[in-house]
Image (spheres, rainbow, N blue to C red):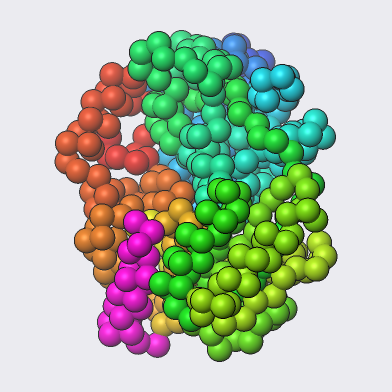
């Protein structure tokens, strides 16, 4: 694909209008469009945008959208471009609107425990600002250094701490959003209690930029922590994992911060292909990484250890290793995070992010495992996830080079199982382009029609992130 596409008359008009409204420094076109704006971390590929717009403030976002709305030109919002569902992949001839210059934390209110930020601030910067003031940002995920808070909000990101702090939706008090015609919708609420009719900000959390662009947010913070008690536990089966989770939540007063389950296939791969250290023998059915964050981890250690002793006494756990240092805890987490090292060695892979009711997770994994062994012998598959909130990730590969036939067949088999268990085809990664064909496996026809009705009402010209979530 050429880096210098042919410019049509209407393209010239669009670029001239954008440069007039925003200044030439905020508009890139042709060879000045970097490769990073052509896709995200997914395998989805779209077209080449006619321009990349880089506004520095809300007013500039508003003016850019007003121009695109008038000229009926599609707009694709882009944050840190770390998405895994193709939600930020541009369409041919669209305007990609990057929030990377809107990267300022505006305020931190220690009395209200809130942080007000522009949408382009990286998640890790927000975490560090909260920690410096004695607070905790409850959202955490592996892409923290690259992802932006606006993208986290637009995809309702999950991550490692959902079991205690909830999804992104649970951490947002207020939003500022620019609608497709350039109207600025200010909903910068700072209160926990505000029952004044429909909570409009919820339309844009998880909306993947299809209804408008998030430009600013008010986030709820939590009390700061000084560390965590962390353990890796070997279990004799999924029912034991549920028993340990129930007991830990009660005994630790709801302060379990992570409960990451790894089936044996994943654990073995992490300690071989992934290069992670193996604190426990690799021949147990299941492993859980459990931690409890707190302001006084040393004082809380006896209670945490008592939970593990109880699990061993009850026979739920067959072995356990408690982190004795920060380095030990990092090694335990390296096991869970080693998927990044494994994926290139298993490529090409297909990766799933599904959720089912917590009590059905064991059945879901066993049914998926049987589907792979019966229908796709010879393809490796492994299972892991944030089991405390019902989220399971699956990786299968290497896949044969058959034009995507095997990939599609595995998707159909897995998503059929998810539908039969009343689950979701996307627990935390969103729908974007990649999962749009499977949306009906989790949402009813009436729900999808209501999504279309909302899209038509807010974006009648269909310019906002077209083709994502639902077909235009």
Q: Nearer the viewer, residue 86 or 226?
A: 226
Residue 147 in the image: x percent, y percent? Answer: 63, 43
Seen at 40% across and 20% down, the residue is: 199
Question: In the image, 424: left or right of 190?
Answer: left
Residue at horizontal 51 percent and vertical 61 percent from the top? 247
Q: Judge whether residue 124 can be spotted in this image.
A: yes
Q: Is residue 451 above or below residue 325?
A: above
Residue, x 55% and y 59% (percent of image)? 248
Q: Which of 337 and 85 is in front in this view?
A: 337
Q: Main secondary structure of the magenta part?
A: helix
Q: Does the magenta stretch include residue 470?
A: no
Q: Give above or below for 312 relative to 78.
A: below
Which stretch did the figure color magenta? 357-378
Let me know if residue 234 appears in the view.
no
| Vertical order, 395 against 356 (above or below) | below
Magenta region includes residue 358? yes
Q: What is the residue that sits farthest to the left in this orientation?
A: 445
Q: In the visual, does 397 lie left or right of 458?
A: right
Q: In front here: 459 or 14? A: 459
Residue at the (74%, 59%) spot, across then down: 301
């Amino acid at each position: 694909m050429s880096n210098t596409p042919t410019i049509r008359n209407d393209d010239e008009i669009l670029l001239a209008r954008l440069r007039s409204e925003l200044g030439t420094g905020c508009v890139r076109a042709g060879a000045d469009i970097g490769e990073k704006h052509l896709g995200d971390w997914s395998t989805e590929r779209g077209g080449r945008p006619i321009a990349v717009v880089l506004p520095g403030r809300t007013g500039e976002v508003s003016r850019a959208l007003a121009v695109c709305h008038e000229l009926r030109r599609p707009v694709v919002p882009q944050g840190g471009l770390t998405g895994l569902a193709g939600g930020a992949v541009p369409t041919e001839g669209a305007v990609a609107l990057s929030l990377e210059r809107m990267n300022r934390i505006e305020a931190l209110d220690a009395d209200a425990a809130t942080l007000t930020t522009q949408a382009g601030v990286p998640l890790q910067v927000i975490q560090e600002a909260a920690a410096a003031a004695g607070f905790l940002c409850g959202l955490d995920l592996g892409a923290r250094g690259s992802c932006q808070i606006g993208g986290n909000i637009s995809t309702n990101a999950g991550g490692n701490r959902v079991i205690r702090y909830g999804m992104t939706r649970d951490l947002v008090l207020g939003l500022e959003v620019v609608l497709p015609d350039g109207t600025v919708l200010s909903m910068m609420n700072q209160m926990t209690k505000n029952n004044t009719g429909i909570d409009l900000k919820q339309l844009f959390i998880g909306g993947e930029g299809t209804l408008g662009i998030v430009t600013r947010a008010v986030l709820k913070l939590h009390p700061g922590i000084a560390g965590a008690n962390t353990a890796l536990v070997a279990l004799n089966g999924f029912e034991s994992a549920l028993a340990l989770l129930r007991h830990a939540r009660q005994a630790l007063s709801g302060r379990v911060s992570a409960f990451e389950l790894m089936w044996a296939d994943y654990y073995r791969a992490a300690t071989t292909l992934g290069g992670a250290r193996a604190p426990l023998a690799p021949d147990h059915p299941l492993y859980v990484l459990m931690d409890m964050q707190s302001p006084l981890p040393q004082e809380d250690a006896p209670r945490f250890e008592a939970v593990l002793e109880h699990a061993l006494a009850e026979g739920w756990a067959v072995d356990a290793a408690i982190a004795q240092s920060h380095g030990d805890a990092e090694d335990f987490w390296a096991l869970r995070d080693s998927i990044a090292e494994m994926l290139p060695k298993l490529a090409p892979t297909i990766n799933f992010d599904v959720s089912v009711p917590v009590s059905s997770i064991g059945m879901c994994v066993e049914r998926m495992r049987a589907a792979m062994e019966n229908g796709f012998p010879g393809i490796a598959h492994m299972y892991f996830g944030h089991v405390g909130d019902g989220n399971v990730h699956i990786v299968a590969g290497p896949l044969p080079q058959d034009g995507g036939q095997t990939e599609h067949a595995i998707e159909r088999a897995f998503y059929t199982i998810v539908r039969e268990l009343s689950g979701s085809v996307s627990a935390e990664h969103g729908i974007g382009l990649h999962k749009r064909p499977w949306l009906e496996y989790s949402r009813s026809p009436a729900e999808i029609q209501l999504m279309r009705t909302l899209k038509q009402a807010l974006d009648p010209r269909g310019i906002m992130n077209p083709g994502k979530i639902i077909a235009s």
